Image (spheres, coloured by chain):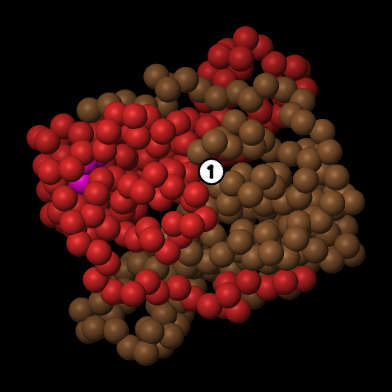
Chain colours: A red, B brown
Amino acid sequence: MFLDKLDWRFATKHFDSAKKVSEEDMHKILESIHMAPSSFGLQPYHIYVVSDAAKKSELRAAGFNQPQFEDASHILVFCANSNVKGRVNQMIETMGGVSEEFAAMLHGFSEGLNGENAKGWAARQAYIALGFALAACAELGIDSCPMEGFSNGDFDTILGLDSNLSSMAVLAVGYRKDGPAHPKFRFSNEDLFTEL
Amino acid sequence: MFLDKLDWRFATKHFDSAKKVSEEDMHKILESIHMAPSSFGLQPYHIYVVSDAAKKSELRAAGFNQPQFEDASHILVFCANSNVKGRVNQMIETMGGVSEEFAAMLHGFSEGLNGENAKGWAARQAYIALGFALAACAELGIDSCPMEGFSNGDFDTILGLDSNLSSMAVLAVGYRKDGPAHPKFRFSNEDLFTEL
């Protein structure tokens, strides 16, 4: 149950580098990403799944030397795809054609999105998928750490990204060596919610 | 189980307006949002939980007349909080003080984020929480529809948002009247993932 693990999960700083996530569990985590919803179903993102030790070491060097990049079993790098027009065409082709109405809506939407707006929109969709991956890990009893503290430009170079892709966030997954160093802080419900 | 519901869930277009989500289940959905991770734990967002019929009708009018805004049991509006400096001060105060090192890191981070960058960063954090709420709904067998198709400015006015808040996305929650009109489309794993 995901909902029973909300407090159990935490941003794991120290992973046990000897413990690897099984292929079966990795498949489940990736499936949650695969099935996550996105605006118009365009899934404007690509995820690099890094388990190679040398590559993880390069990521660590570009990530303020944070040990999670090396000690975690797998590093998922969520990249936004800002070529929305290309994604629309690819979707229509993959679906083997869509209704004229839906095609017009998709084209109209993508034409209204350019530059930073396109990247921002794509990144937000990627963060829904990041949320799904976090939820999947929690349900499976797998530890994880969402991370934004790295040089995006260096990551893009290390991963050899096409110019339409930008690394936005990482989810390090594996097994905790230590529990949380501090109790979990959250703002109150009164702070976060207004009921109308 | 969340992972068993990945295919069951879909962006519900037609909600049964007679069926309301129980207070107990709403509490669980909001708790998933409450406990969702965010960068530095700053939770730079606020969520409006709208069940009032008149207010939902106003949202529908500002949302291209999409019926979900009225027929769903509850409308959650995720708003990004772009006043990151204010949020940092509030966090430090709420925690009753933090180490000098952590305070310096938080202040340095917030000073580097301004205008659209602050809003974009805050919105991305909100989308992790949106992912958690989607996962919670699926696990509970509650239908939902994530929506970006509305006039953000009109929503901000209807909700009476402070200037630091911006409505970004909606999650309509309730119970489906009809199943999905089309099979779910997703890009292939080959398209979405690269293993290194």
* Position of A126 relative to B62 (above/below): above
Q: Secondary structure at mark 1?
A: loop
Image coordinates for residue A1, horizontal then vertical, percent? 50, 49
Task: Name which quarter of the figure residue A174 lies in.
Answer: top left
Q: In the figure, is residue B82 to the left or right of B97?
A: right
Q: In the figure, is residue B50 to the left or right of B5?
A: right
Task: Name which quarter of the figure residue B194 lies in.
Answer: top left
Label 1 crowding class (10 Å Cα cut-off): few <14, some 14-19, many 20+? many
Q: In the figure, is residue A43 to the left or right of B155?
A: left
Observer able to see residue B1: yes
Residue shown at the point (37%, 58%) measured from the top left:
A9
Image coordinates for residue A50, horizontal then vertical, percent? 24, 34
Q: Is residue B134 magenta?
A: no
- Choose between B139 and B114: the one closer to the eye: B139
* Position of A102 relative to A192 (above/below): above
Return the chain for callout 1: B
- Choose between A64 and A140: the one closer to the eye: A140
Q: Is residue A72 magenta?
A: yes
Observer able to see residue A166: no
The magenta region covers A69-74
Residue shown at the point (77%, 71%) measured from the top left:
A196
Image coordinates for residue B155, horizontal then vertical, percent? 74, 61
Q: Identify the amino acid type marked 1.
A: Phe
- Choose between B179 and A36: the one closer to the eye: B179
Residue shown at the point (45%, 73%) measured from the top left:
A186
Which residue is labeled 1 in the image? B2
